[in-house]
Image (tube, helix red, strand yellow):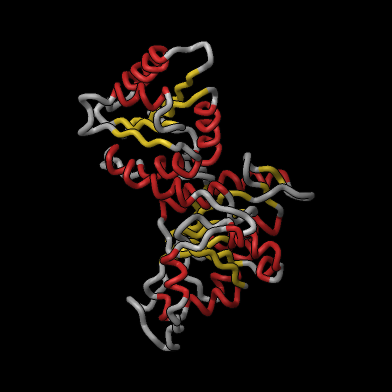
Amino acid sequence: MVGIILATHGGFSEGILQSGSMIFGDQPNVAAVTLMPENGPADIRAKMEKAVASFDDPEQVLILVDLWGGTPFNQANGLINGHEDTWAIVAGLNLPMLIDAYGARFDESATAHQIAAQISGSAKDGVKIYPQSLEPAPAEAAAAASVPQGAIPEGTVLGDGKIKYGLARIDTRLLHGQVATTWTKMVSPDRIIVVSDAVAADDLRKQMIMEAAPPGVKAHVVPIWKMCEVAKDPRFGDTKAMLLFETPQDLLKAVEGGVDIKEINLGSMAHSKGKVVCNKAVAMGKDDVDTIEKLISKGIKFDVRKVPSDSPEDIQTLLGKAKAEL
């Protein structure tokens, strides 16, 4: 696995390391290196050398720095001498860049050079302006907008005519940082589809979800009946989707309506009056227990974890705790 050094002025590297852990979970072979006011160039270089020595594979190292030409960059540039074939430096460290780097390491064959080439794009795409009207329009986007885009005729069969589900997840918060980054990087969907009657009827929530989509992935919010139609529409045969459900009840309605889901990732179910806290992220009431048991009886497997790096929990253990306390 590629080792990652976060090298910055002040405590920025330690802060962004913590932020990355909140979203992606704690990561091995990552070190935060700081240049404090009382430090000199030799101090941060020594910290980098110590970090490299701690990595499982010191031949594959990626150094992410805050500023091109700053002291962390200059010392990294000196340290990389003789390792140019396997090490890389990327300046302009931000959170989208770090999350992309973490995601790229799911492929254990990925090299520091390959990850460096990939993450520069996510770092730039992560810079957005709101209101969106302030965003400058790229020339290529303006040109594309002038070309008429026709809808795919009804009855057209793309691919094998069946939509692919890269991930189906129950999460009270729906599309948020952990989903937009960690799971998206792991699944690589063409689109994220929030399936909820309640959200589809709420224009504000719908707009917020669509704006939270990660760069390069379209987000949609549809009522359950619409998702059932999409599941049967052969025009989506080339689509790989990530489905997000707010509740297990919504999921059951979709499954009973023909959405062919084999496995569900249970990420979070918020606590409210009448529900039992089953773990740090999941609380269940009687209706939740009954619904999940119905889903299991239909052959659906449950993968209980918030982020890909978590160890899965046993759904039966959570159900047992809920039933014992309800």
Q: Is residue 61 left or right of residue 5?
A: left
Image height of 41 relative to 259, above or below: above
Q: Nearer the viewer, residue 162 or 138?
A: 138
Image height of 148 relative to 255, above or below: below
Marks counted in the figure total 0
Q: Is residue 40 left or right of residue 193?
A: left
Q: Quadrant of the N terminus?
A: top left
Q: Residue at (58%, 56%) from the top-left corner?
A: 212
Image height of 148 relative to 243, above or below: below
Where is residue 132 drawn, in percent x and y? 60, 60
Toward which corner of the image does residue 4 lie, by quadrant?
top left
**Residue 123 visible in the current orientation:** yes
Toward which corner of the image does residue 80 lie, by quadrant?
top left
Where is residue 276 drawn, in percent x and y? 71, 45
Q: Nearer the viewer, residue 264 or 110?
A: 110
Q: Is residue 84 left or right of residue 301?
A: left
Q: Residue at (68%, 44%) from the top-left corner?
A: 324
**Residue 299 visible in the current orientation:** no
Toward which corner of the image does residue 130 lie, by quadrant?
bottom right
Q: Nearer the viewer, residue 217 or 64?
A: 64
Q: Residue at (39%, 41%) from the top-left corner?
A: 101
Looking at this rendering, what residue extends furthest in the right direction? Answer: 273
Image height of 172 relative to 66, above or below: below
Q: Residue at (47%, 74%) from the top-left corner?
A: 145
Where is residue 267 drawn, in percent x and y? 56, 49
